Amino acid sequence: MHSFSKRLLGVADLLLQAQCPLCQRSTAKTFCPDCQRQIERCRFCHAEWMQQEHLPIFAWGSYSGALRRTIAVFKYENKPHLARPLGHWMADAWLKTPDRVIPFTVVPIPMHPDKQKQRGFNQAELLAEHFCEQTRLPLQAKGLERSRETTAQFQLSAGDRERNLADAFSLGAAFHKRPPTKAVLLLDDIYTTGATARSAAQTLRRHGIRVQGLIVLARAALEKDKG
Ligand SMILES: [Zn+2]
């Protein structure tokens, strides 16, 4: 190849290099190979449904280490583009399950509009878009609405969290007009105590809508993990 065109290609390569959002080293992919490896370590080898207080949950990985940092960067350092690889990973794990052929409607856990305005995006909705892009499941982002702002959950005891979330959701405009004919698969970024997801599921079930479970990118350790 002519040396001049080689040089041009070199410049193009440099322009294509982005910064790894976790360590700021330059990378040709979303994450540098090092951080990618660290995130992969948080992935569950055999992702499957786990029964949790009337709401089965399905998680891509454990809410710890590099995955926990990735989610923090995604949400709090304004990196909405990370939803694409993360949503696709969730989809890849899902597509390996026997449930992949069941036609669910995917509903992301909504944020309160004020909070969403502050952040600029709802991380669950973005993850759901990319999850559905890959799984081809129908998405209904307006299935639920956050009817009231809740106190930051981490400041509350377990009992107060449940009370804080009672009636935090209402049925969204889309489901008011036309309730889904398929069961709903809720989607969120993380699962910690499960109070938010249970509250969302209760709201749908109160309106006669079937809820299959919740799929998340990451979940905190459960009692059964420890035993
Ligand atoms: Zn990195």
Image (tube, rainbow, N blue to C red):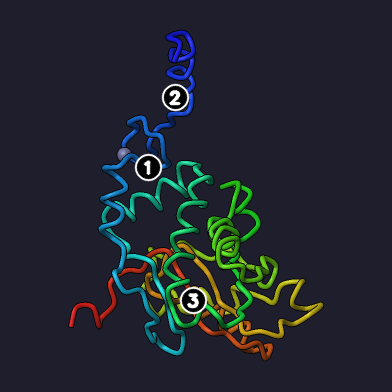
C-alpha gap between disc 2 and disc 3: 40 Å
Q: Badge 2: how crowded within 10 Å, few (<14), some, or many (20+)?
A: few
Residue type at mark 1 is Phe
Counting residues from the start of the chain, the first of labels 2 and 1 encountered is 2
Task: Say how many tags the image has.
Answer: 3
Query: Does residue 2 appear left or right of residue 200 in this picture?
Result: left
- On the image, the x and y values in percent for residue 44 come to 30, 68
Q: Which residue is mark 1?
A: 31
Q: Which residue is mark 2?
A: 13
Give the secondary structure at mark 3: strand
Question: Does mark 2 have its CB less than 8 Å from ligand 1?
Answer: no
Q: Residue at x 60, y 46 (%)?
A: 120
Q: Which mark is residue 214?
A: 3
Q: Which mark is residue 226?
A: none
Give the secondary structure at mark 1: loop
Q: Residue at x 55, y 80 (%)?
A: 101
Residue type at mark 3 is Leu
